[in-house]
Each structure stands twice: as C-alpha cells, then as structure tokens.
Image (cartoon, rainbow, N blue to C red):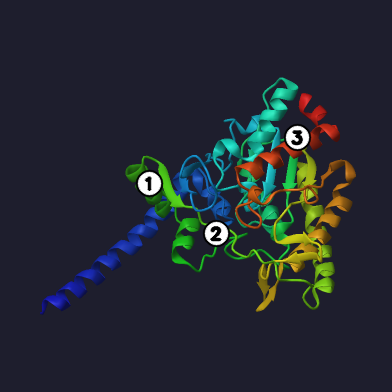
Amino acid sequence: MSWIKKSLFLTIGWIVILIPALILMEFLCRSLFPQTAWMEARRINVIRDVTYRFGIDHLYPYPEDTITYTRDEYGLRMRCRDPAEVDILTIGGSTTDQRYIDDGETFQIVLEDYLEKKLGKDICVANAGLDGHSTYGHLLAFEHWFPLIPNLKPKHIIFYIGLNDSPFRNGPTIGFDVIDESIVKNYLRANSIIYQSLRDAKYALLNRGTKFAYGGHAPKVDIDFPAIRLSDGVSAIAERHAKSFSTRLVRLLDHTRQLGAKPICVSQPHRSVVDTDQGKRGIAYTFSVNGVDFNGLDADFTLQKTNQVMREVCGEALYMDLYSKEFSADSFYDYVHTTPKGSREIGLYLASEYEQLGLVRDLLE
C-alpha cells in the first residue's frame, strides 16, 4: 500500500474516532456546565467577559492609537460590578455600544458622572448596546439575554434607537440582530461549548485575556451630499415602516414595565444630511433593499417618521429629542458613530434632559 493510501486511511480513521468523541464531549459539557444557558444570547450577538484593544488611529484624532473596550461576564459595559446596582440600562445598536470609544469616555459614563455629582450618591449606568441591533434585536434581548443577568432591576431603561430601523427592516437581520449561522465559525460560536472554551483559552494564553483588533468602521468619505430629493416611493414605504416600528416599540415598553423600569425614548442624530442655502441635501447612499439603493434624504425622512412614533408612544414626559440638537462634524467619525467629543455631548445632553424632565427624582429612591 502506497504512503498516500496509508495517510488517507489514517486520516479517515481519526475522523471516524474524533467526531463521535467530540459530540460526546459536547453533550457532557452541556449537562455539566451552566453556561449553556448563554447559547441563545450568543445567537443574538451578545459578547461577554472580554477585553479588547481596538486600533482607532484611522477613525479620529486621539492621544493614543488604541482604546479599551470591555464587556463583563453578563455582557454589559459598565463601571459597577453587580447588576443589582444598575440604575439606568441603555439599549440600542452600535451607536449605544460605542465599540470604538474607550470604556471611560462613553456617553453612559458621562451621564453617570454627572448624575453622581448632582445627587451626591453612587449611580450605575449600564451599556447594553449591541452592534447592528434594531428593535427586532432588542426584543430578542429581553427574551434571551436580560433574564440571564441576576438581579437586574433598573429604574430606567433608555432606548437610544431609530437609525438601525431606518433601512426598512421586515424582520431580524442576519448578521446583525442574529448571527449568520451559515458561517461555520459563527455556528460553532453560538452552539459549541468546546469551541468557545478553546477560543477563550487561546486568547488568555496568547494575549493575557486582552484581544487586539483594528477598528472596523470606516471614516466618512462622501462630502459632496449630492442627493437633493427623496427616491421614488420612499414616502409610502416609510409610512408602512413607521406602523411596524410602532408595534415593536409598544412591545419593548411593555417588557420594560414588566421589569419594573420606566422607559425613556431618545431620538438619534446623524450626519447623512446637511442643511444648505438650497435646502437639505443627503449623501448618495445609505442602504439597499432588494437591490434598490436609498440615499441620505431617504434615511433621514424615515428616521423622522420613527422619531414621531417614539414621541407619540413614549409620551412627551419620557421622550428626549437628540435628533434636533446641533452637532459639529468632528462629533462623528462617520455618518452615525460618535467620537469621544460626540459621546460627551450626548451624555451631557441626556443629563440636562434628566433634570428638565424631573427624572433625577427616581434615582433618589
């Protein structure tokens, strides 16, 4: 028998032995370890118990080339250690997550510092933003993530939402609201305890628990804002979309009240449009649906419709209009994600609104 045939038979033999052994080990791990409860959370892109160093020198000026991004064992970005201490839980997508903003400079930390100084007591503002999540993903978070966090009873839940619902989503988006399990790596991440354990062990050994990555967002490149009108059919689509968004928002507020918390809705600013002497103009492209491209004016028009829904559903007493606030170009490193300067401005705005709406009184109890 040639060496090629011998190698082939040996390889097949090892595969026949290893696959059943790995399956048996997986079943044993699932029966022995409680972390299996977190599998559904991983499917909706919850990451936990990690520290990253992200390279951000290509995104915005900063004293250092990297920032620190930390998620605790429950998947939250927060300064306090015990979920029972959380006073305010912030929910949203990547603009809430602020993956490329340092742990100490997110708008949650700015709000927390302000409230602590104002009230003279410890306050905890937790960041539950997940990159790519829309209201579809937020609903899944209430079902598959928050019940796993012990003693989580925030007084307030801030919904910083709207932008990720603008692209006319008709359901959870694969790769964003839920992971794409057609990719083998993602499937194993969501379903295999062995894979996750080996992955964590690799980072612990090679990087002492800290993972390095280059910031994945691209800085804005379209500075001409060529769009001068809405695309055909956008108005009617946006109206239908707003009704669907309203249904999901009502469900989110119901979940919030079931947790014993008060919901607060915050509209989102962006830089996909600019005001000129000739009127509002937009960037050429923001998203595609079924092969049709939509511009900045389309996204802005749709966002205004969702903002109107938030104002009506949440009520004036629990609505903060951040969309209408003025921001400078250097507050964003692309069209929606903030620099440290922008995050600070958002945190201070929220703090101001907390005072004006009388919400600080809830935190004294």
| Residue at 55 percent of width and 61 percent of height | 179
Mark 2, residue position = 218
- Figure label count: 3
Closer to the camera, 154 or 166?
A: 166
Q: Farthest residue toward the front?
A: 277
- Which residue in the protein does label 1 denote? 203
> Horizontally, is 153 left or right of 98 in the view?
right
Specify the amino acid type for callout 3: Ala
Q: Position of residue 27 (x, y in %)?
A: 43, 54
Q: Quadrant of the C terminus?
A: top right
Viewer-nearest of labels 2 and 1?
A: 2
- Going from N to C along the chain, the mark reached first, 3 or 2, is 2
Other-residue count near label 3 (Cα within 10 Å), few / some / many at <14 / 14–19 / ≥20 = many
Q: The residue under label 1 is which amino acid type?
A: Tyr
Q: Which mark is residue 351?
A: 3
In the depicted view, which residue is nearer to us: 187 or 204? Answer: 204
